[in-house]
Amino acid sequence: MNTVLDRFLRYVQIDTRADDESASCPSTPGQLVLLRLLVDELRELGLEDVTIDGNGYVMATVPATIDRDVPAIGFIAHVDTSPEMSGTDVKPIVHAKWGGGDIVLPDDPTAVLRVADDPALAAQVGHDIVTASGLTLLGADDKAGVAAIVAAAEYLVRHLDVPHGPLRLGFTPDEEIGRGANHFDVARFGAACAYTLDGGSVGELEFESFSADAVRVSFLGFNTHPGYAKGRMVNAIKAAARFIDRLPGEGMSPETTDGYQGYVHPYQLEASVDRTSVRVLLRDFDTAQLRDKQAAVERLAREAAAEIGTRVEFEVQESYRNMREVLDRHPDVVEKARAAMRRLGVTSIERPIRGGTDGSRLSFMGLPTPNVFAGEHNFHSRLEWTSRQDLEKAADLVVELARVWAE
Ligand SMILES: [Zn+2]
């Protein structure tokens, strides 16, 4: 039997860094290497319906051990890692029975996990902490989830006395560049609900996310030779500057909000006299208030445009919606996650996600999907870490959820 830690250490050494410049799916070939390895491992374990589709999505079934008609439930993890940090030659290090001192990563002594700065780490004295070596991320986000799901599947096929219905497993590419749900075939997956294992500390249970849109506001001016521009030039940059300056700040910008507060966030500018575009992110937990934010942005842009004399155009793109809108209609899904955690002696930690997950998209595609812990800490960073104990708890949670749903 492979331990969940063995699996994890194997998976993180495969470079699966996503690339948002790439149009292919998966965006990078390394992801396919891991996805194909998973196909082999799942077949070796004797799972049924092990498939990989043209976009690299891997699905498999752990067959039911009971005759009663219980719903199929799913477990999903993503194989890619963040484009923000190198994932090449990840050298995982197991700090066995960690004594509680700061952890200096050997390949770059300036990369130090300081216990004083990291209460989640401080709580794990005596555990087997896993880090990278200082030059790369670790990839616990989300190979911790991948390893936990495969380890749980192995446990279940070797312990047929555990009562459970059919379990569907899904391994996806390119979550980190927001494409993880793009080609997810919900109908073929065929589960009543699912859980992404892509969370942090033991106990994390996430079922509320932002509702999110992106708006591109374009000011259209008129360019002439500046020496002969009097009375003719209309400078789009100046309209955009006025607009940005008037965007709500305190209590409505990322740098002044937290918890349940939403925000309006200009994050990219392409500027010329002729045409200046401002990209703005809109975020709110309440979709109706998201629309209010959009209306406010358009009003401010129109005012600025009128004052300078440009035209203005808007392109609104829906990003994702608060999964709670779906999950509130399926209260069992979250309730059973709480129940499974209680049985493991774990207190659930429930906080809104100030972002989106694949689950936010999947929930609206017909697959209610909250997110649960996988033991990811300091993700997207050289200081990323997890622990053997976290990985084992995540695998236990999968097993326990399977049990709870069969009752
Ligand atoms: Zn993740």
Image: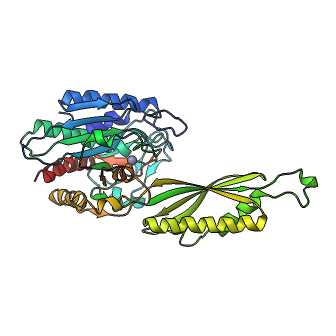
Seen in the image, is 290 located left or right of residue 236?
left
**Which residue appears at 44% of the width and 29% of the height?**
29
Instruction: Say whether residue 131 is visible.
Output: no
**Residue 361 horizontal/vertical position (percent):** 39, 51
The image position of residue 125, as x and y in percent, is 29, 55
Q: Quadrant of the C terminus?
A: bottom left
Side of 154 where 133 appears, left or right? right
Q: Residue at x 25, y 59 (%)?
A: 330
Kindly indicate the quadrant of the structure image that contains residue 316.
bottom right
Quarter occupied by the N terminus = top left
Q: Quadrant of residue 121?
A: bottom left
For the point 39% across and 60% down, which residue is it?
Answer: 322
Q: Tell me where residue 402 appears, x and y as whole percent.
A: 16, 48
Compared to residue 116, the image places residue 359 above or below, namely above
Please say which color scheme the image uses: rainbow
Work out which residue is located at the far bottom of the displayed protein and give it.
250
Note whether residue 28 is visible: yes
Vertical relation: 70 (above or below) 79: below
Total labels: the figure holds 0
In percent of the image, x 53 and y 35: which residue is there? 22
Q: Nearer the viewer, residue 365 or 257?
A: 365
Q: In the image shown, does 51 or 295 lie closer to the viewer?
A: 295
Rendering quarter of residue 304? bottom right
State the residue in front, 129 or 392.
392
| Residue 231 in the image: above or below residue 46 | below
Residue 331 at x, y percent in the picture:
24, 62
Q: Residue furthest right?
A: 228
Q: Which residue is nearer to you in this view: 355 or 315?
A: 315
